[in-house]
Amino acid sequence: MSEHEADERFQAALAEARLEALREFAYGAGHEINNPLANIATRAQALLVDERDPERRRRLATIVDQAFRARDMIGGLMIFARPPRPAAEAVPVDALVRRAIESVRAVAVARDVRLEYSPAPRPLEVYFDPAHGAEVLRLLALNAVEAGRTGGRVSLSVAEGERDGRRVVVVSVSDDGQGMDAVMLRRAFDPFSSGREAGRGVGMGLPKAWRLLDVGGGSVVVDTRPGRGTRVEVVLPMPVA
């Protein structure tokens, strides 16, 4: 074994050990943080029912909203740490893409982002957990809308392909935002790593999508350049004939 090969193996082992430590921390911390968050949200909601003062109602509503936002963030982190076991089945990919588009349409309208969809020439099915597939595409579409420029567009497309001798479906999600440099790209799948300004997302979209794909037999590839937007390709297995 050459020195270069030994170094590559060492770096791969180090990365896996780091990821495993992060998963264990995320799962344990998630359990500990979720309980007080639930108590805060429940108490604030109870106080909100009988509160009549407009300013106090505004403050209580903010507490509830932020508690739920934190809960969703922790939920994403826990899925990254220990994703649910997938239940794969044959599902039309077109239905998953259209579901993702509808789930982010309101955000796109608010940001004046145009959603475009180019379906495959013929109906295609993927062999994947339908709930996981819908969530993956929702996360990537939302990430693209939020990363893109105001007044821009986000494009989704579906194509049939082949990877390592097997038939696959490739779903592409592209935006025309600022893109990522090499440093940002290396950290794109790390939890809480986000190239957006504070308050614009929590950096869990790509990591959560990657984990759901990884456990379900799919994969993801990111093609991006600074100033030229980002293209994310999701590769999903097709049912075996």
Image (spheres, rainbow, N blue to C red):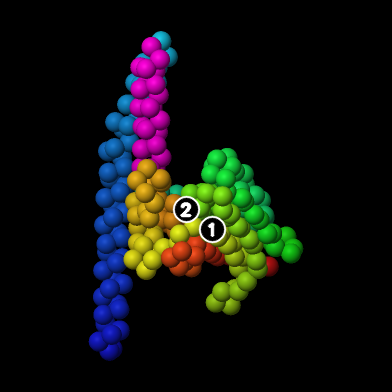
Vertical arrangement, residue 199 with respect to residue 169, above or below = above
Judge from the rendering whether residue 147 lies leftward or rightward of residue 35; answer left or right.
right
Q: Quadrant of the C terminus?
A: bottom right
The amino acid at mark 2 is Ala
Judge from the rendering whether residue 115 lies leftward or rightward of residue 72; answer left or right.
right
Residue that carries the numbered disc 2 in the rendered image:
147
Which range of residues does the magenta coloring cover? 53-75
Q: Position of residue 30 (x, y in %)?
A: 31, 42
Residue 129 visible to the viewer: no
State the residue at coordinates (47%, 53%). Answer: 147
Depth order, front residue of 22/87? 22
Identify the element where label 1 is drawn. strand
Q: Position of residue 182 (x, y in %)?
A: 37, 68
The amino acid at mark 1 is Asp
Identify the element where label 2 is drawn. helix
Q: Residues within 10 Å of mark 2 (few under 14, many from 20)?
A: many
Residue that carries the numbered disc 1 in the rendered image:
175
Q: Residues within 10 Å of mark 1 (few under 14, many from 20)?
A: many
Depth order, front residue of 59/215? 59
Q: Quadrant of the N terminus?
A: bottom left
Q: Position of residue 88 (x, y in %)?
A: 56, 55
Residue 17 visible to the viewer: yes
